[in-house]
Amino acid sequence: EELAEIQEHLDCRESDNALLKGGFLQLYSLQTNSGDDEETWKDLKKHGFDDNLDLVKPANSDDNKSLNNESEK
């Protein structure tokens, strides 16, 4: 159910419903604005981002594929 909501309301690629960079930013903006900034930083670091939000090491190339590839929807 949560996945369907993400795909419906956030920026995802139509062909495979992969979360695009815009959707990733939307998701974490919503999470942070709801007061859960500690969880946001934990998640961002898990995905390979540093304190400046630079992608320093991909956690898993398959997990980050959608973030780095903004194919048309």
Image: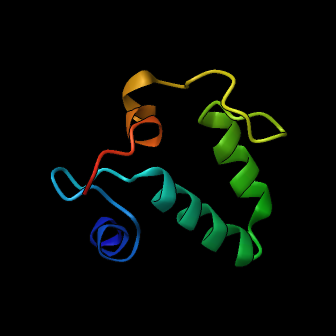
**In this view, 1 is above or below 58:** below
Q: Position of residue 27 (x, y in %)?
A: 54, 65
**In this view, 9 is above or below 71:** below
Which residue shows up at 63% across the image and 21% down it?
A: 57
**In this view, 30 is above or below 70:** below
Looking at the rendering, which quadrant does residue 45 occupy? Answer: top right
Please indicate whether residue 64 sits to the left or right of residue 12 in the image: right
Looking at the rendering, which quadrant does residue 37 occupy? Answer: bottom right
Q: Position of residue 47 (x, y in %)?
A: 59, 36
Which residue shows up at 30% across the image and 75% down it?
A: 8
Can you say which quadrant of the picture contains the C terminus?
bottom left
Q: Position of residue 16 (x, y in %)?
A: 18, 50
Which residue shows up at 30% across the image and 50% down it?
A: 18
Which residue shows up at 62% across the image and 62% down it?
A: 28
Please indicate whether residue 19 sits to the left or right of residue 15 in the image: right
Numbered label tally: 0
Q: Position of residue 21 (x, y in %)?
A: 49, 51
Can you say which quadrant of the picture contains the N terminus?
bottom left
Looking at the rendering, which quadrant does residue 56 occupy? Answer: top right
